[in-house]
Image: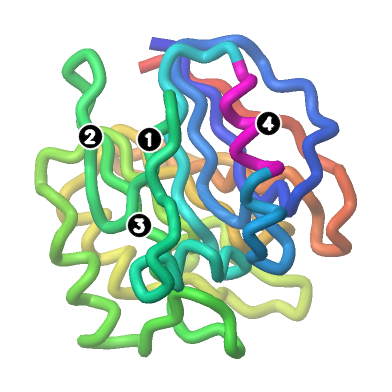
Amino acid sequence: MKIVLISDTHTNHNFRIPKGDILIHAGDVTSRGTKAEVDVFIKWFQSQPHKHKIFIAGNHDFYFENAVKNNLKTEFKNLIYLNDSGCEINGLKFWGSPIQPDFFKWAFNRKRGEEIKKHWDLIPTDTDVLITHGPPHGILDLTTIGLYSGCKELKKKVFEIQPKLHVFGHIHEGYGTTTINNTFFINASLLNEKYQSAHIPIVVNL
């Protein structure tokens, strides 16, 4: 199956999205997390021709963090929204989570250590494609100030279960791919650290 990977579009939809069977967005679909921004994203995402379209929220996407409390819509026609949850498509098992280590006062923050580990413990061991907003520590997570900002607990979990694919974003300047052990890691951020269009979607075949 041809899987197209994107992340961190922040309401910028001026990208050429390659054709494929599955389109995955790894979070930060908005800039300020408003309902209006979500509505624009949903309309754009639904318009893509891919048979299956999966997305998670990111730290900018307050709408989704507040969805339960404010009784907001999180089910959208022809889209799959994952929030510490999974789905299966043609035998491939997907799991998605918006959770990230504490990052200022953004959405879906969790303290490093046991608090965030509780979320990673939910990831099934037979996951084929893992979608998180934030990266694992030391993997495509180097910031412009020289810090590796990813999550150590997430890295431990990924190395334990070794999914075929782990896609994320969050650290725009970490865009790219690498393979470690049996896992292909992708930072699919489409904007650079200045929030400018700088990168292209990444396509993989599974």
| Circle number at residue 151 | none
- Left/right of residue 10 with respect to residue 127 in the rendered view: right
Which circle's residue, 3 or 2, is located before the other in the chain? 2
Q: Residue at x 77, y 72 (%)?
A: 144
Q: Name the residue under label 4.
A: 44
Q: Residue 43, located in which quarter of the rendered image? A: top right
As drawn, 73 above or below 100: above
**Residue in the foreground of this view, choosing between 48 and 94:** 48
Q: Residue at x 57, y 26 (%)?
A: 46
Q: Which amino acid does label 2 sit on?
A: Cys
Q: In which quarter of the image is the C terminus?
A: top left
| Circle number at residue 87 | 2
Q: Which residues are drawn in magenta?
A: 40-48
Which circle's residue, 1 or 3, is located before the other in the chain? 1
Q: Which amino acid does label 4 sit on?
A: Trp
Mark 2 closeness class: few <14, some 14–19, many ≥20 residues within 10 Å = some
Q: Mark 3 points at which residue?
A: 97
Mark 3 closeness class: few <14, some 14–19, many ≥20 residues within 10 Å = many
Q: Mark 1 points at which residue?
A: 80
Q: Which amino acid does label 3 sit on?
A: Ser
